[in-house]
Each structure stands twice: as structure tokens, then as C-alpha cells.
Amino acid sequence: MIELRLGVEDLADTRFAVSALAETVLSLRVWLLPGYYVLQLPWLRQARAALGDLDIGPLLALVGAHRAVPDFLTARPAEPVAEFAAELERVRAVPPAKVAADVRAALQGRPVPPVLAGGLARPALLRDRLAELLQDYWSVALEPHWPRMRGVLEADMLYRAQQLTRGGARLLFADLHRTIGWRDGMLRLELSYPHRELTIPVTGRGVCLMPALFVKTPGLPLDPDEPPTVLYPARGIATVWETAPPPPPGVLAALLGRPKAQILGCLDRPASTTDLARRLGVTPGAVSQHLAVLHGAGLVAKARTGRSVLYARTGTGDRLLRGAPGGFGGFGDEDSR
């Protein structure tokens, strides 16, 4: 059990962030434990094909099958949606002593892998070498997928903001993951990894909550003195790489038209126009037109998060979708558009 003790100011300073660099580093776990990360296997197949002759051995050795990663590679982002290039510049500025300490902490007493041999004696060179490898790996394995990955992560943050509005911090924390709870000013994580029993005073640093696509259970920095950052599995991970949209209910398709019914069916989680267009195999412009009609009818709501506008079904849209199979009598055979 790990406890984060939050004061009133810490609670007020709780925020969300998305890190392209953290996703890049955490994705390395999938290469080592593909049977454990089954939802990410479609991405792994595409990444293997795209990797070519790029040798990511040093990166894989750094992460290792024990799944720990050095803190300086998953640090709390400076922005709500951090850009990869800016985060990588921060990595290049990490003091060599911290690089060596974080790598040793991630290895957890294990011998230094041969591919990294000598690196801890010259941590500045190791840091720069890892930064170059991460840049190349990001470019071929993550960057092509990042727009829709970011869309899912931003949709998660929007959902969490709605939970905070509905039920305060208690509902927000309780809904993050089954291992996370909130009671008596403590954020409790039922984790035996990376620490055993530990209480961490947040003391004015606030907590950063980071949804991630390449984690299955929540995680914290290995060093309890790092700024408190909680990584947790984002909602909708399985939808990132899916391509087929859900079939619309027949009656609803007849009432709204098939395209609008499909869009409404896709909005089980908030999504951007680009995300919906990818899933439906149409142009963003076409999706925008249908969304405008659905929004005008009060069936979907929209909100801006970062650089994206996300759409979600309203309560009316939910009720319409749930009632579609039997709620419209004989209209099911008509092609109403």
C-alpha cells in the first residue's frame, strides 16, 4: 500500500497531463511482454513492420522484463499535453548524476545489461545516446499513431473532469482504477511495486494524474522524492487501433440516417472529429457536418481540450441509443435521411 497525503492546497493543485515521451518509453514493455499487453498487440505488429533495421536493444535493456523505467524518462510534464520534442530536450538537460541514479534504481539491483555496459561510468554519453534512440524510435513506431493516441488520452482527461464535477475528488479518484481509492485526505494505491509500504507527503507539490495507453496497472516514480505523478490506464485503450465502427441500430439508422447513427454509436467515449473519421473511414469534413446536426439536436455535446474539440453523447443521445431497438415502431423500414 502506498499513500499520498494531500493537503487542501495539494488537492486544489491536482491536475492531469499527457506525455508523448512517457508513452514512447512505456511502449517498450510491450516488446518484452506481448502476452501481457494483449490490447496493444495491433500496435506492436505495425511497429515491428515499421522498425526496419533500427536497433532498440539498448532501450529494451534499459526497461527490462521487470517493467521498471528510469524516472527521468517519465518525469511530470510541464504542459497539459506535452510535445515529444520539448520533452526530449528536457531529457538532454538532465544532470548526469541523476541519469546514473535513476538507471540504477530501475535495474533494482540487477547487473547492468551488456548492451549498456560502461554507460553508468559516462552517464552524460548514455543520456545522449538514449535520447537519439528514443527520437528514432518515436518517429517510426509512435509518431504516426500519435494524433489518435492523443485523442483517446485527451478524451480520458475530459471524462475525469466530468467525474470531478459530478462527485468531487472522491469520485474522481475512485474511478481511476480499482487499486486507487480516496479516504481521510489520503490517495491510496494498493500496489506492491515499486515500493512496499510507504506514505508520501505531497506538501505543496500537487499530484499529476497521467492517463497512459501502455500501462495495465497504476504506477508512481521509483524515487518517492520525485514530484508525485500517478500513471493509470486510460479509458478506451482497445479503440486506439480498431478500424471497424460499431453497426448502428436499424431503427436509429432509419430515423437519423446511417452516418449519424454510426457516429452516435461511436461516442461511447469522447472522441475528436479526426478520430471518428478514422474509425468510420470517411473524411473529417463529412463527420463535422453530421456532428453539427447531432449537436444542434442536443444529442451530442462538445468541449475543447488542448488543441482538440471532443464530442460526447448527451443524456438524450444515450436514451435515444438505448431505446432504438424497440422505441420507434414501424419506422424501421423507412430510409429517413
Image (cartoon, rainbow, N blue to C red):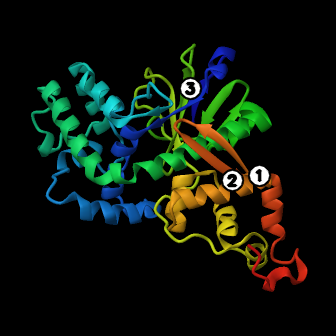
In the rendered image, the vertical position of residue 131 relative to residue 179, given as above or below? above
For the residues labelled 1 and 3, the Cα–Cα distance comes to 38 Å
* Residue located beneath label 1 in the image: 296
Q: Is residue 270 left or right of residue 58?
A: right
Q: Quadrant of residue 174?
A: top right
**22 and 317: which one is in front?**
317
Disc 1 is placed on an element classified as helix
Task: Identify residue type, mark 1.
Answer: Gly
Q: Is residue 109 left or right of residue 132?
A: right
Q: Are marks 2 and 3 in contact (CB under 8 Å)?
A: no
Q: Quadrant of residue 50?
A: bottom left
Q: Quadrant of residue 322?
A: bottom right
Q: Is residue 36 visible?
A: no
* Residue located beneath label 2 in the image: 292
In the rendered image, the vertical position of residue 255 relative to residue 176, given as above or below? below
Q: Is residue 58 visible?
A: yes
Q: From the image, which quarter does the N terminus lie in?
A: top right
